[in-house]
Image (cartoon, grey):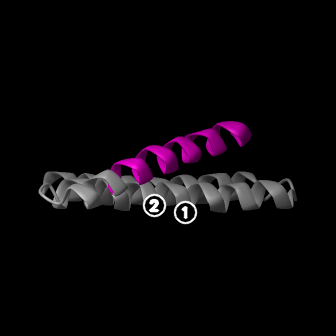
Amino acid sequence: MFVDVTCVQVAVTMYVRYRQVGEYLLTSSSRRAERVNKASLVSGLVAALSTTLVANFPVCNHVQVLGLYLEFITSTLSKLLHHEYV
């Protein structure tokens, strides 16, 4: 249950970060930066969801492996996208 609460906190943090970068981007009208911001939000939310997959299915090996790969790829992508613009 602790991991589920943590995943919700990660999702909320990703949304707040999305809104912060969105407010920052209001001064610049870069269409590409807006798309990168949305892609970063989606990848962060998928990373949080995949973490719950890993935590809630400890016996099912296929689901855990899928969750691990999704978590690693999407969280890395999210951090790289945020690092590019902010």
The residue lying at 50 percent from left, 50 percent from top is 74
Query: Magenta span covers which residues?
Result: 67-86
The C terminus - image quarter: top right
The N terminus - image quarter: bottom left
x and y percent of residue 49 in the render?
A: 36, 62
Closest to the observer: 40 or 70? 70
The secondary structure type at the circle numbered 2 is helix
Amino acid type, residue under disc 2 in the picture: Leu
Closest to the observer: 81 or 27? 81
Instruction: Examine the structure image and report whether residue 77 is included in the region drawn in magenta.
Output: yes
- Tell me if label 2 and label 1 are in contact, CB under 8 Å: yes
Residue neighbourhood size for the residue with mark 2, other residues' Cα within 10 Å, grouped as few (<14), some (14–19), many (≥20): many
Q: Which mark is residue 79?
A: none
Q: How many marks?
A: 2
The residue lying at 56 percent from left, 41 percent from top is 79
Amino acid type, residue under disc 1 in the picture: Val
Q: Which mark is residue 45?
A: 2
| Residue 9 appears in the picture as rendered | no
x and y percent of residue 53 in the render?
A: 27, 60
The Cα atoms of the two marked residues, 2 and 1, are separated by 5 Å
Helix, strand or loop for the magenta stretch, by majority: helix
The residue lying at 12 percent from left, 57 percent from top is 59
Q: Against 10, is 86 above or below?
A: above
The secondary structure type at the circle numbered 1 is helix
In the picture of the structure, the residue carrying the numbered disc 1 is 42
